[in-house]
Amino acid sequence: MKVKLCGIRRPEDVAYLNEFRPDYAGFVFAGTRRRVTPETAAALAEKLDAGIRKAGVFVDEPAESIARTVRLAGLDAVQLHGNESAETVAELRRLLPGVELWKAVRVRDRNSIPRALELGADRLVLDSFSASAYGGTGKTADWSLIREANPPVPYFLAGGLNSGNVALAVAELSPYGVDVSSGIETGGVKDRRKIEQIMRILRKVGS
């Protein structure tokens, strides 16, 4: 099972990831609280262990702009977290051959996941619904809707995951991967102890 730790924005965060080795580091290029510039992400990515892949989170950004950031920061995956269209996904596939394209879904109802599947992304990131934010809210996703949809493409489970519920989430849904952000923070910054704790749990349940 894959593990993505998202919202990396400090050299200390990179050091924690290099120590505990998730599969993906996530850099957020939208919103405010965890946002980094492409230049900052590139500088942090240079210090990241070569075995950790890099994903970038974007919200309704033009494909050409996303492609520039991907090239600058050396990203391996693009996570689209807004209202992007199938045309945007197709354009990114043309501009960025070999880069994984993920579509985040704020799971609100039974139609949320089927609509996202029509966009043609390689992976889905299934998150909780919030009318005021595009992710990182700490709210738990609706697992019952995800189980009912049984997505036919690999997906990351996101939304309110922490050391107290992640083992149950994996047992209930068997996702391709998990995506954790607020659950490894204290006071709005990444917490080494929480990262160690959740990685220990995930390596155990995912083995």
Image (cartoon, rainbow, N blue to C red):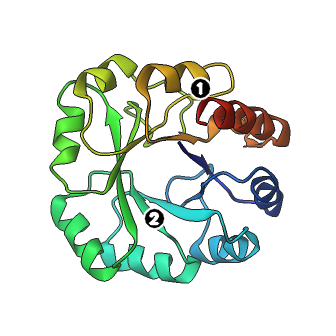
On the rendered structure, is 35 left or right of 48? left
For label 1, the residue is 166
Q: Which amino acid does label 1 sit on?
A: Val
x then y, percent, for residue 17: 75, 55
Front in this rendered view, residue 97 or 51:
51
Judge whether 97 appears above or below 167 on screen: below
| Image height of 109 relative to 6, above or below | above
Image coords of residue 34 (percent x, y): 62, 52
Return the residue nearer the eye: 119 or 85: 119
66 with respect to 138 (left or right): left
- Residue 111, labelled with which disc? none
Numbered tag placed on residue 77 in the rendering = 2
Q: In which quarter of the image is residue 186?
A: top right
Identify the residue shown where x is 61% and y is 29%.
205
Specify whether residue 162 is in view.
Answer: yes
The answer to which of 4 and 204 lies nearer the viewer is 204
Q: Can residue 186 be seen in this view?
A: no
Q: Where is residue 73 in the image (x, y as percent from the top left)?
A: 57, 77
Which residue is pictured at 67% across the width and 56% down the height?
Answer: 8
| Mark 2 vs 1, N-terminal side | 2
Q: Residue at point 36% right, 66% down?
A: 61
Q: Tag 1's secondary structure?
A: helix
Q: Is mark 2 on a helix, strand or loop?
A: strand
Q: Quadrant of the C terminus?
A: top right
